[in-house]
Amino acid sequence: MKKMMLLVTIGILLLLSACSSGSNTSQASTKDTTGEKQVVTFWHSMSGAGQETLDSIVDDFNNSQDKIQVKAEFQGTYDEALTKFNAVAGTDSSPTMMQTFEIGTKSMINSGNILPIQQFVDKDQYDMSSLEENITKYYSLDGKFYSMPFNSSTPVMYYNKDAFKAAGLNVDQAPATYEEVEKAAKAITESNPKMKGFALQAYGWLWEQLLANQGALLLNKDNGRTGTPTSIGWSEEEGKSIFNWVKNMVDDGTFANYGTNGDNMVAGFLAGDVSMFLQSSASARDIIDNAPFEVGIAFLPHPENKERQGVVIGGASLWMMDGKPEAESQAAWEFMKYLQKPEVQAKWHVGTGYFAINPAAYEEKLVKDAWAEKPQLKVTVDQLQSTKPSYATQGALMDMLPEGRKIIESALETVYNGENVDSTYKTAVQQFNDAIQQANKARGN
């Protein structure tokens, strides 16, 4: 009897063990099923319309397949995101990929914590030549791509067509030179004393663009493309032309001083406080949609004694982090390629005002319809595609460029406040050269 009871007890225990084992197997299977998607953590700095469009594109990608899940995470401004990256680079807390502004290119390369996308390009035989040449040129170093171009823009001139008409100016032919801008600014202010003629945000990027449009280099050594820069690359005539241009309008009382605050400048334009200003083409959609008047968009102006050369690409690119599992990096690469599809780039261009990295996007119906409704958007593309290739318009590379921009911004604000151009310019050049030398010393150059 005892033997019989023992056998029954053992049988029950074995049955319970089997059920328990089956339950664990089922849970493991569920976990594997839900965990099949490879997660890609994507740090970005898009806000406003840019973030809304990006989130929509990420959702489209995630819903288009069942193997990859991209998690887009906002990390603040470009500077803030780069600071966060530097704090976690090389650790498990770093993202799979991140967006970094163009002047952070050398910093990312020098960090030693990125995986150049060239190896993915080579493995897939991916055709980078199908992308916009004036954009890929910036991100190509010695024939090698370290990052994938993403949100790209250039500055353009926005102007109030209603104000131009009231001042007797040609609404369909915006001022093309510094001198023409000054003349138009006077006419605007004379016709409406409550409105200033022109505004220029004290922003180093805009100053760099005004240099490049003259064919001037920001740094020597061909803008850092053929060697490590040792000093500035522009001449005194080229550099001072921008300061003197603004000073003339400050003295005339036609200049609107918004300092470094670009948001206030845009708000001033929309409120009718200023008739012309320079800003990123990425703002085009928002400005056109929100202005209570007809907005004109024109090419960046240049001195009348200089031939227009064009613009340097701005914005940011996407970087792959080193040290991640191969499957994770490969998943990020698949997302990067998805972003370059014509239909995706069409959605990006129309939703934000940024350029389409893949020019085939401009043939999409979505873009053609948008251009028919808002022809100003096409002007930004025309300016980019008519840019003359050179070291000046290819853009500068050095890890001190964020500091250099701050130096120029301080100098511009000084001029805006009525100070002497010669002394301000001399100080800015000295500080810029010092920053270059200090950066070289820090890297043992």
Image (cartoon, rainbow, N blue to C red):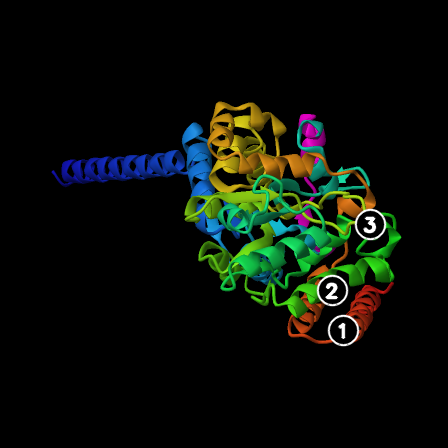
Say which residue label 1 marks: 424
The answer to whether residue 50 is visible is no
Q: Nearer the viewer, mark 1 or mark 3?
A: 3
Is 363 left, or right, of 401 in this rendering?
Answer: left
* 225 sits left or right of 296 in the view: right
Q: Residue 305's mark?
A: 3
Q: Marks 1 and 2, how far apart in space?
A: 9 Å
Q: Which residue is mark 2?
A: 243
Q: Nearer the viewer, residue 104 or 209?
A: 209
Query: Do the residues bearing badges 1 and 2 touch, measured as CB atoms within 8 Å?
Result: yes
Report helix, strand or loop for mark 3.
loop
From which residue to which does the magenta span run?
Answer: 110-128
Q: Is residue 363 magenta?
A: no
What amino acid type is highlighted by mark number 3? Answer: Asn
- Check the image and name the residue furthest to the left: 1
Residue 192's spot in the image, x, y percent? 51, 59
Q: CA distance from mark 2 to mark 3?
A: 16 Å
In the picture, the quarter occupied by the C terminus is bottom right
Amino acid identity at mark 2: Phe
Compare residues 396 and 119 and report the one nearer the observer: 396
